[in-house]
Image (cartoon, helix red, strand yellow):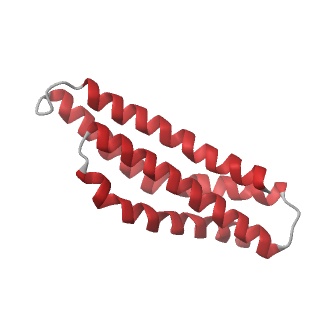
Amino acid sequence: MTAQIKTVVGEYALLGIGFLLFIGIGGLLQGDPTGIGGAIVAAAAGAGFVAVGLGFGPYLAIRNSRGISNALTVEDNVLYAATFIANAAGYLALGILVLIGGAIGVSGELVGQLLLPIVGGSLIIGAIGVLTIFYEQLF
């Protein structure tokens, strides 16, 4: 069971590292923050935050929950707990890495403003994972 949790958290973290590098290195290389480079990096950071929140989190939760469900043969409550923990911890890792990239590339103020929504989002992503398994068991 721990292998599946590590795999799920690792997938989220790898995606977060990609965003961190894209946003962070872009911010360091932009030069003048008021020029076109600053606008490009700010747009990339905004797109990264939107993609993490609206696209990748729920998709990975559904995909990874199916994988955990197929790999584990345990009682339902253990399966639900493992799925919730894996997806919530993974999304939290992804969100924190994106926030670090945003702090490097755009503004450190973003970290303080978006940390609590990332924590709340991780609980929602964990619930999406559990609901995915529950739905698959019903149908």
Relative to residue 63, is residue 138 depicted above or below? below
Q: Is residue 108 visible?
A: yes
Give the residue displayed 53% in from the left and 41% down from the top: 15
Give the residue displayed 61% in from the left and 59% down from the top: 87
- Residue 70 horizontal side relative to residue 125, left or right: right
Relative to residue 92, is residue 78 depicted above or below? below
* Quarter location, residue 136: bottom right
- Residue 32 horizontal side relative to residue 10, left or right: left
114 or 131: nearer the eye? 114
Q: Position of residue 3 (x, y in %)?
A: 77, 49
Total count of labels? 0
Instruction: Quarter of the image for the N terminus: give it.
Output: bottom right
Instruction: Quarter of the image for the C terminus: give it.
Output: bottom right
Relative to residue 128, is residue 43 depicted above or below? above
Q: Position of residue 104 (x, y in %)?
A: 30, 38
Instruction: Give the residue at the far right of this rendering.
Output: 73
Q: Position of residue 106 (x, y in %)?
A: 25, 41
Q: Position of residue 120 (x, y in %)?
A: 45, 68
* Quarter location, residue 31: top left
Give the residue displayed 85% in from the left and 73% down from the top: 75
Q: Is residue 139 visible?
A: no
- Residue 20 horizontal side relative to residue 138, left or right: left
